[in-house]
Structure formats: structure tokens, C-alpha cells
Image (cartoon, grey):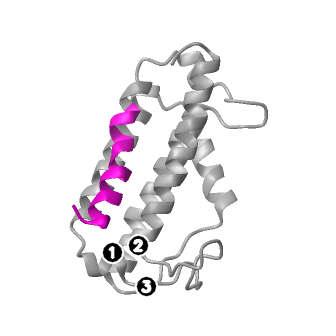
Amino acid sequence: MSEETKIISEFGKYSSWLNTLEDMDETLWSKPIAKDKWSVSEIIAHIINWDNHLLSEVIPSVRNEKGMEFPDFDTHNKKASDYAKSGISQSKLLEEAKDTRELLVKELKELSTEMLNKPLTANSVTHCPHTGTPYSLIYIVKEFTDHDNHHRGQIQQFLKENNLD
């Protein structure tokens, strides 16, 4: 299995993990996971929002061999929070999260190894300031996997604290 396939496979595991949240108590679903933090529903909406951005903006840009553009994080994340609070049901949000991630994984699998690894800019920056690695779509997918895992850990800790793990 190629490194790219492993990264995409790991990224796709998020979909099945979402199934563990289906029986979560509705009151905890909307409760902040800690003081000044989002609720589980807001975190899930946040990840959906980024998945949608990758699908609608980043992948088409990569296909056209253009740089990747990312919106202002705070504004983008506020939209996700507002969406989670819009009255969408837990089951509907989880279904949307799974469907969006599965579509994104399908799209990523259709790209060639060359396209996944092609050096591209991210908001006009060529290299990650933390690692010095040149940006590419597969590098971004790996970063998003780390981001997902960070939020999964927060949710799992919250469930543990509420005796639901």
C-alpha cells in the first residue's frame, strides 16, 4: 500500500468513527465539551465545513494545478458553529458528516499520485512554517487527519468525563 493510500485510508476512518456518536444523549450533543469550547455538534459541523471546502475549492484548484486557498479560519468556523445551532438534528448532522467525508475520500482516491504530491501553495505559501515541508494536497490531507484526531480526542475525553465511553 502506498503512503498516499495509507494517508487517505486513515482520513476515511473518521466516517466509521462517527457511528459511535449515534446513540449519544441529545443534551450532551449540544453541551460545550469544556468551558469556552464547542459542543460535539459544533465540532462535527466544523469538520463538515472543512471537508466541504476541500471538495468545492481545494480539489478543483489542485486539478487545475493552481494553489490551494483557505478562508479566514474564524469566519469559516463561525459558520460551522451557527449551522450546528440551526436546529439540524443529531442524526442528520452525523449522516451529512459521513456522506461528505465518504465523497471526499472517493474524490481523493481518484487523483493520481503525482497530483496528490504536486508541490502547491497554500494561501500563497510554499512550505509549512512548522515543518518546512512543501505543501501538497496529500500533505494537507495528513494535516486534516491530525486535526480530526485532535477533535476526536476531545470528544472521547468529554464522553469519558460523562461516563459514556
Q: Quadrant of residue 125?
A: bottom right
Q: How many marks?
A: 3
Location of the N terminus by quadrant is bottom left
For the residue carrying disc 2, how many other residues have a C-alpha within 10 Å: few (<14), some (14-19), or many (20+)?
Answer: many
The residue pinned by badge 1 equals 116
Q: Residues within 10 Å of mark 3 (few under 14, many from 20)?
A: many
Q: Secondary structure at mark 1?
A: helix
Residue at image x 78%, y 37%? 36
The secondary structure that dominates the magenta segment is helix
Q: Are marks 2 and 1 in contact (CB under 8 Å)?
A: yes
Q: Which kind of residue does numbered mark 3 sit on?
A: Pro
Q: Please, is residue 28 above or below residue 106 in the view?
A: above
Is residue 129 visible in this depiction of the protein? yes
Region of the chain picked out in magenta, as a range: 1-18
Q: Residue at x 65, y 76 (%)?
A: 129
Residue 43 position by quadrant: top right
Q: Residue at x 65, y 24 (%)?
A: 31
- Real-space Cα distance between discs 2 and 1? 5 Å
- The image position of residue 156, as x and y in percent, is 55, 29
- Camera-side residue: 37 or 143? 143
Numbered tag placed on residue 137 in the rendering: 2
Q: State whether residue 86 appears in this view.
A: no
Q: Residue at x 23, y 76 (%)?
A: 112
Q: Is residue 9 magenta?
A: yes
Residue 57, horizontal then vertical, whole percent: 43, 70
Tell me if mark 1 has few (under 14), some (14-19) or many (20+) residues whose alpha carbon lies within 10 angstroms of its own.
many
